[in-house]
Image: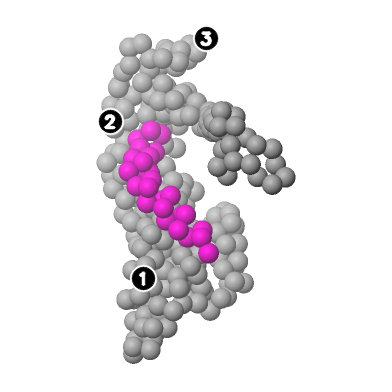
Amino acid sequence: MTPGKPVQGRPVQSPLAYQARRIGGKLALGFSVVVLLAPCLFVFFWMLSLALKYDIDNTAYPPVFIPNPPTFDNFVHVFNESPMGLYFWNSCIVSGLATLAALVLGVPAGYGIAKARAHSLAVVMLISRMTPGLSYLIPLFTLFQFIGLVGTIWPIAITHMVITLPIVVWVMIGFFETLPAELEEAARIDGCSVWQAFLYVALPLARPGIVVGAILSFIYSWNNFIFGAVFAGRTTRTMPVAVYNMLTFEQYQWGPLAAAAIVVMLPVVVLTVVIQREIVAGLAAGGVK
């Protein structure tokens, strides 16, 4: 509505009142965002503060919020006490294999479910994603122990694929349902098979959805802890398990523990910040039907 223009049944709104209403709405939105994000930001900055302080400051009362002076001894301690480079490489292999397998299987599955309009099957995929991983941890452990894979990378990657596959399928269903059916029908008329129409028509148009599915799968796989803690050996641990190994029975070393947590979350944070536009654009494109 143009400010100042009379509308039937409504009073005339002056330009000044219209601008004041817009500014008030933006202030209210900004305040709401700050209130919602304040707990998360406080936890993050408190963890960063713990990682940059000495132990005497981490246990001081009243708490010391700002390191004075900051120190990087906790990060040095983390890399000296544990092979973080090896754990980082293990996490990259596990998350990469799980994401790749989820894309190879999930993208065609999402296309088939979307074109067949098998909404009940889509709900089953969503329920499988909502099911806690602990519910099928014991059967998987028994299976992998029987075939002798416990302690290697493979059971972790396979179980992570169980987590990431429903995410990719669910995201791709929404994307393929938004594609115009006329494009694929035109390809079929020109002589393309169903598989060729999928490869040369639907797949290039669904690139934003594939990017979003890959990013979400990688993040979920990278942050998963329970499967890595159960199936990994001493040389096949992932980064979240490395943080757990920083806990000792004698005392809690808050500085090294916070430093290890920052090392684990830093790759995911950097990845999210760098490609946040792709995530937002992909999710928005998939949500329009």
Of all residues, the one furthest to the right in this rendering is: 9
Residue at 37 percent across and 80 percent down: it is 197
Q: CA distance from mark 1 to mark 2?
A: 46 Å
Residue at 51 percent across and 73 percent down: it is 114
Query: Which residue carries the number 2 mark?
Result: 80
Going from N to C along the chain, the mark reached first, 1 or 3, is 3
Query: In the rendering, at what x and y percent does residue 192 appear?
Result: 34, 86
Task: Identify which residue, 257 or 106, lies in the foreground.
Answer: 106
Residue 243's image quarter?
Answer: top left
Residue at 42 percent across and 69 percent down: it is 107
Query: In the rendering, at what x and y percent does residue 204 appear?
Result: 33, 68
Which mark, residue 58?
A: none
**Magenta segment:** 261-289
Query: In the rendering, at what x and y percent does residue 27 appear?
Result: 55, 28
Q: Quadrant of the N terminus?
A: top right
Would you say 147 lies left or right of 8 here? left
Badge 1: how crowded within 10 Å, few (<14), some, or many (20+)? some
Tell me if label 1 and label 3 are in contact, CB under 8 Å.
Answer: no
Query: Which residue carries the number 1 mark?
Result: 203
Badge 3: how crowded within 10 Å, few (<14), some, or many (20+)? few
Depicted 124 relative to depicted 212: above or below: below
Query: Which residue carries the number 3 mark?
Result: 62
Depicted 117 relative to depicted 211: above or below: below
Task: Name the residue type under label 1.
Answer: Leu
Q: Is residue 169 visible?
A: no
Task: Name the residue type under label 2.
Answer: Asn
Element on which disc 1 rests: helix
Task: Identify which residue, 20 or 206, lies in the foreground.
Answer: 20
